[in-house]
Image (cartoon, rainbow, N blue to C red):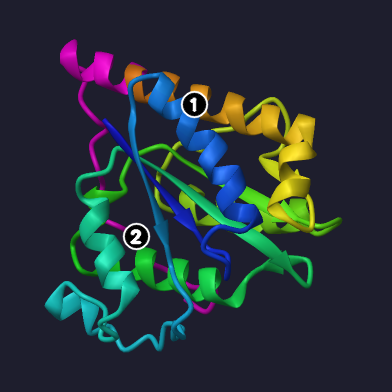
Amino acid sequence: MKVLLVNGGPHKEGCTYTALTEVSKNLNEEGIDTEIFWIGLKPIAGCIACKTCSKTGKCVFNDVVNEFVEKAKDADGFIFGSPVHYAGATGAITSFMDRVFYSAFQGGKGDSFLFKPAATVISARRAGTTATYDQLNKYFGINQMPIISSRYWNMVHGATPEDVKKDEEGMQIMRILGRNMAYYLKCIEAGKEKGIKQPEQEKTTFTNFIR
């Protein structure tokens, strides 16, 4: 089993990475493979609603988004990390997740995420963590992905990686998150071995408030 951890911060080994590393370490201790995927520093365009992905199976912008969606096929769980910018997720991780989830489902690759557990990890110097936590969890809720929690909201505080390591409660939250994710992955695997099937999927009913 494998978990993909996404570093949505601008620093490859910054505060968000420090938190994700603590989660990854505890997943490894539970026998779960991990990979930390950095979205990088190149500009990530937002979704332009062209729906090319529904025809080709890929986003029209061939960048880090398509690279990640390919990796997602072989992952069993996901953790998306972001620092706080102006009380919300970064512009880069927002554009990234908009296109990842839209192109995956429009392109018929929804099973890359369907029913796979996911979590967010939020890093901040001081405030805006809960707003960012709420923002990113919405991607999972709309895509039928179980949301994994910890003993507290999944957040750490600090202006530097060294500060984050001193956040004793935050580091504990990350350790518990890793173990909780491992627990759910093992439960899902045990269910498969017992022959428990995923819920039957209905054809989507799409309406609006004008109709």
Q: Report the Cα–Cα distance between label 2 and label 1.
A: 40 Å
Q: Is residue 147 left or right of residue 74?
A: right
Q: Residue at x 59, y 27 (%)?
A: 175
Please state, as top left, top right, bottom left or bottom right, where the N terminus lies in the image.
Answer: top left
First in sequence, mark 2 or 1: give its number: 1
Number of on-image labels: 2
Q: Which residue is mark 1?
A: 26
Q: Toward which corner of the image does residue 106 lie, by quadrant?
A: bottom left
Residue situated in front as seen by the camera: 198 or 48: 48
Q: Nearer the viewer, residue 85 or 199?
A: 85
Asked whether residue 113 is in view, the answer is: yes
- Where's residue 183, x and y in %? 43, 19
Residue 108, numbered circle: none
- Magenta stretch contains residue 182: no
Q: Which residue is mark 2?
A: 205
Q: Amino acid at mark 1?
A: Asn
Secondary structure, mark 2, is loop
Percent position of residue 83, x then y: 66, 61
Q: Residue at x 48, y 73 (%)?
A: 208
Mark 2 Cα shell of 10 Å, populated few (<14), some (14-19), many (≥20): few
Q: Is residue 203 magenta?
A: yes
Say above or below: 151 vs 119: above
Does residue 51 lie above or below 97 as drawn? below
Residue 134 visible in rendering? no
Disc 1 is placed on an element classified as helix
Residue 44, compared with residue 202, is above or below; it is below
Of residues 182 and 197, the one nearer the viewer is 182
- Please give the range of residues in magenta: 187-211
Q: Position of residue 60 (x, y in %)?
A: 25, 86
